[in-house]
Image (cartoon, coloured by chain):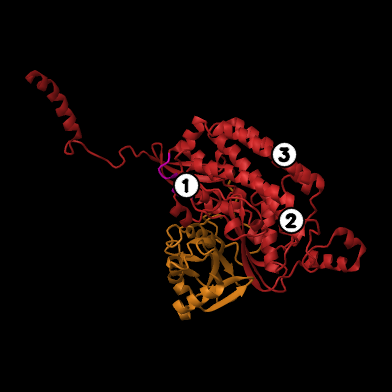
Amino acid sequence: METKVEEVAPRSRILQALEDQDTSASFLDPLESEMILNMGPQHPATHGVLRLLVKLDGETVVGCLPELGYLHRGYEKLAENCTYHEFIPHTDRLDYISPLSNNTAYSLAVEKLLGIEAPARAQFIRTIISELARISSHLLFLGSLSMDVGALTVWMWSFREREKLYDIFENLVGARFTTSYTRIGGLAQDLTPEVAAMIREYITAFPGNLEECEKLLNRNRIFIGRCDGVGIITREQAIDLGVTGPTLRASGVNHDLRRTLPYLIYDQFDFDIPMFEGGDSLARYYQRMAEMKESVKIVRQALEKIPNGPIHAFKPHNVLPRKKEVYTRMEELIHDFMLINFGVDPPDGEIYFSIEAPKGELGFYIMSKKGDGHPWRFKIRSPSFVNIHALPTMLKGAMISDVVAIIGSLDPVMGEADK
Amino acid sequence: MDNQTVLVRLKTRFGGAILESREFRGELTVVVPKERIVEVCSDLKNDPDLSYDFLSDLCGIDMFTPEKRFGVIYNLLSLKNRHRLRIKTFTEQENPRIQTVSGIWGTANAHERETYDMFGIVFEGHPDLRRMYMPDEFEYYPLRKDFPLMGIPGSLPLPKK
């Protein structure tokens, strides 16, 4: 018995000596292992020209600083020097993944400032294109997130679906990418029966195709392992940081502007606002998948209910006349001349209008002065700009390899973050 | 909660601090003096009835008048009451300074940095007031009305070869 104690004792004494505070020295950072890693602006996982300065301790992120401005084009300054109609093409370049919903948001904001409203058919078409834009944006999210965590097939499949959407946009608008479809008080052209049939065909096939992608991911061990529990943002943090859109709802906040402050005709449709509690990358993935299915519901109901009628409000001082009438009638020619050269002339006032864009709350603050065809101040409240500034909170404590999964689940677009 | 209720409530609470109020297209705008902006904002957020817990947007404005030249605009949203409110405050032309609200809403941090970058309004007490979009050594403030649309030649040095 005694020999046994003697055998153990020297080892434990050494261990005890090692653990003793008097014999061991502790340094806060003995090897100065904290390093600053520069990620971007040219990095495939940052979805554009986002630059992150990440402070690392070993493989753990201890701090993060987003640097913006690599795509800054000064749209707010440009808008102050454009007429209201001239700025429509610039809105395509904000969130270039879903230009149709930016067009809609801008037109609705200017219409609110002018105090006019587009006719019912135009409102239905705007709802349909906003929801198609949401599907298009969330499909890109699906593809890029899964590619960021290593599943390349889903990228191909989601881009196949986006390609069909672009075909629809091409037939509806005449352009695939930079649509500039809406006009103040109306739309550029009407929804033809052929395009309506294309959309109907698309939304019939889409849920099945989406399910194929889900089958690849929902029970995929690698995908879940990479996304589960990373980049958590709590409910309180999300509200405090002003995060909006799917990211906010994936943190358990039931806030969707389509429900909270309804615009267009969203109060006429029967759809749910999905909500998840996790607040991590996986919840944000589930959130967007569920939102796409709700968008399909809205498009289907809108196509059923869509009324016939004009697509332009009859407000000659504010709404551009049709080209056919400009060439044949005097009044329309005069209005066209005045609108092109001097623009619409809203009264003294200021409005803030926002819609639920695919990425979150896209708002426009416009201040106008009477007698001036330009906005005096034009502010774009872009969802990506605010969401990116939640990254330091999400990244804190994450592993370096999770950074791409977190950025991917946030789905920022630098076009609107940098304005 | 409608605009009138909010306005009456603000007037009883702050009295002289409500310099001006206007309703346009159903949106209420209230102008307050810059000295009391933090007090008004924290009350708007913490009051259980009003509860403007979500700062949708914060931006600057250049009115281009000698007095009250620069302004800051706070677009608030109450998630509980589903109501929007706009607070405005103005500051002088020379050395524009204003108290930060980033302690009240975390999102103001980014918006105030952007406003500083574009208008040169200094937010006192801001934890990290740097340029947002423009390079750090840039001397001008692009969204001021006296900054030309075409830019100032030579203000952005090209990299040396």
Q: Which of the labelled discs sits on residue A164, or is there none?
A: 3
Q: Secondary structure at mark 1?
A: loop
B6, B126: nearer the viewer:
B6
**Residues marked 2 and 3 touching at CB (< 8 Å):** no
Q: Chain of mark 3?
A: A
Instruction: Estimate the x, y position of residue A406 in percent, counting from the top left.
Output: 50, 42
In primary-sequence order, the first of circles 1 and 2 is 2
Q: Quadrant of the N terminus of chain A?
A: top left
Residue drawn at the location 50% of the way across and 59% of the way down: B113
Task: Give the CA distance from mark 2 to mark 3.
Answer: 21 Å
In the picture, measured across the screen, residue A234 lies left or right of residue B7, that is left
**Labels 1, 2: front one:** 1
Q: Is residue B8 above or below residue A164?
A: below
Q: Is residue B14 above or below residue B145?
A: below
Instruction: Estimate the x, y position of residue A385 in percent, counting from the top left.
Output: 55, 53
Q: Amino acid at mark 3?
A: Lys
Q: Chain of mark 1?
A: A
Quarter occupied by residue A309? bottom right
Q: Which of the labelled discs sits on residue A182, or is there none?
A: 2
Number of residues whose C-alpha sits closer than 10 Å to that of mark 3, classed few (under 14), some (14–19) or many (20 or more): some
Q: Quadrant of the C terminus of chain A?
A: bottom right
Number of residues whose C-alpha sits closer than 10 Å to that of mark 2, classed few (under 14), some (14–19) or many (20 or more): many
Q: Point out the stretch of residues depicted in magenta.
A: A390-398
Q: Secondary structure at mark 2?
A: strand
Residue drawn at the location 86% of the way across and 59% of the way down: A323
Does the magenta-highlighted stretch encompass residue A394? yes
Task: Give the CA distance from mark 1 to mark 3.
Answer: 33 Å
Q: Residue furthest left?
A: A2
**Labels 1, 3: front one:** 1
Instruction: Identify residue for label 1.
Output: A277
Does the magenta-highlighted stretch encompass residue B112? no
